[in-house]
């Protein structure tokens, strides 16, 4: 109402106002009684009845109680027990090991050769592969008058007037031998040259060759202590299980021994090897069936 009065007063008393109005610079004011204003005011006055619960939250927590029931059917007899059996047995495997062994090399393993003068050379086939720790040699002649010089593995000595002579061989320690291969060579130089007759020494050297090769009138043996690599049998206990059902379908209930353990022995490479006491038994594992 006040706006309308001001407009009318300006129109009567102000030339500038009338000029501005003529050029469209003065807009007609919006009447508060316009229909869209009335409609808005009507909606505002009826807000409580349209929406309801104004000023309160529109979401509320609600407690809901619900139960679900599922039926399961077990197709097994729960009073029946099923059992698996486990039986222990001895097997084993070889492991490499280093051992010290003593070997006696007989005359038959020696090879003798004559050099055409006064010397018989000799060597033997090694009984094993390894390293010599110590060695000795024994020489026998039925003819106690044999006189010779002996050279081998650190020894350079003369025999004495008797049937049996022997020497330790200090030069053998540390020697590497290969089974079946020949040892370092030794020599026997005949010294039965009476009155300086070299032909007699050559004659006895040839006799030495014949006697040693024959092994009855003369012979030689060597004793070797060697460090060698050997195979050792190591026993193993293996469990074998027999189960007529899947263990995943049941629950282990108890374990019982139906055959007590005992000490067993096995024979490997002609050696008797004891087993493990208390392990070679038969066990029975009882399961409850599951659903």
Image (cartoon, rainbow, N blue to C red):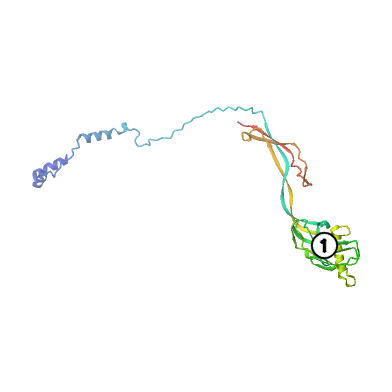
Q: Quadrant of residue 82?
A: top right
Q: Is residue 95 visible?
A: yes
Q: Quadrant of residue 81?
A: top right
Nearer-the-camera pick, 254 or 222: 222
Percent x, y of residue 30? 18, 39
In the image, taking residue 9 as reference, residue 212 lies left or right, namely right
Nearer-the-camera pick, 200 or 53: 200
The residue drawn where x is 8% and y is 46% is 15
Residue holding disc 1: 136
Q: Is residue 219 visible?
A: no
Percent x, y of residue 242? 68, 35
Q: Quadrant of residue 282?
A: top right
Nearer-the-camera pick, 91 or 10: 91
Q: Secondary structure at mark 1?
A: strand
Check the image and report above or below for 142 versus 234.
below
Nearer-the-camera pick, 16 or 269: 269
- Quadrant position of the N terminus in the picture: top left
Crowding at mark 1 (Cα within 10 Å: few <14, some 14-19, many 20+):
some
Percent x, y of residue 137? 83, 62
> Which residue reaches farthest bottom?
196
The residue drawn where x is 73% and y is 53% is 97
- Quadrant position of the C terminus in the picture: top right
Percent x, y of residue 111? 80, 59
In the image, taking residue 17 as reference, residue 143 lies left or right, namely right
Check the image and report above or below for 187 versus 58.
below
């Amino acid at each position: 109402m006040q706006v309308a009065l001001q407009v009318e007063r300006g129109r009567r008393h102000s030339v500038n106002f009338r000029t501005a109005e003529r050029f469209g610079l003065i807009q007609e004011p919006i009447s508060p009684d316009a229909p869209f204003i009335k409609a808005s005011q009507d909606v505002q006055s009826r807000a409580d009845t349209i929406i309801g619960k104004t000023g309160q939250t529109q979401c509320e927590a609600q407690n809901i109680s619900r139960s679900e029931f599922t039926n399961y059917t077990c197709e097994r007899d729960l009073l029946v027990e099923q059992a698996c059996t486990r039986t222990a047995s001895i097997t084993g495997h070889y492991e490499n090991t280093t051992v010290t062994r003593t070997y006696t090399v007989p005359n038959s393993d020696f090879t003798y050769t004559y050099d055409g003068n006064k010397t018989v050379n000799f060597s033997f086939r090694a009984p094993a592969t390894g390293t010599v720790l110590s060695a000795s040699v024994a020489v026998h002649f039925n003819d106690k008058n044999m006189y010779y010089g002996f050279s081998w593995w650190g020894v350079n000595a003369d025999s004495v007037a008797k049937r049996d002579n022997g020497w330790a061989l200090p030069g053998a320690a540390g020697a590497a031998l290969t089974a079946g291969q020949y040892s370092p060579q030794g020599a026997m130089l005949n010294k039965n040259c009476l009155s300086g007759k070299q032909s007699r020494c050559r004659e006895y050297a040839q006799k030495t060759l014949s006697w040693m090769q024959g092994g009855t009138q003369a012979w030689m043996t060597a004793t070797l202590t060697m460090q060698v690599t050997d195979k050792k049998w190591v026993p193993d206990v293996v469990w074998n299980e027999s189960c007529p059902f899947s263990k995943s379908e049941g629950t282990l209930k108890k374990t019982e021994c139906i055959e007590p353990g005992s000490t067993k022995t096995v024979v490997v490479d002609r050696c008797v090897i004891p087993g493990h006491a208390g392990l070679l038994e038969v066990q029975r594992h009882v399961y409850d069936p599951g659903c």
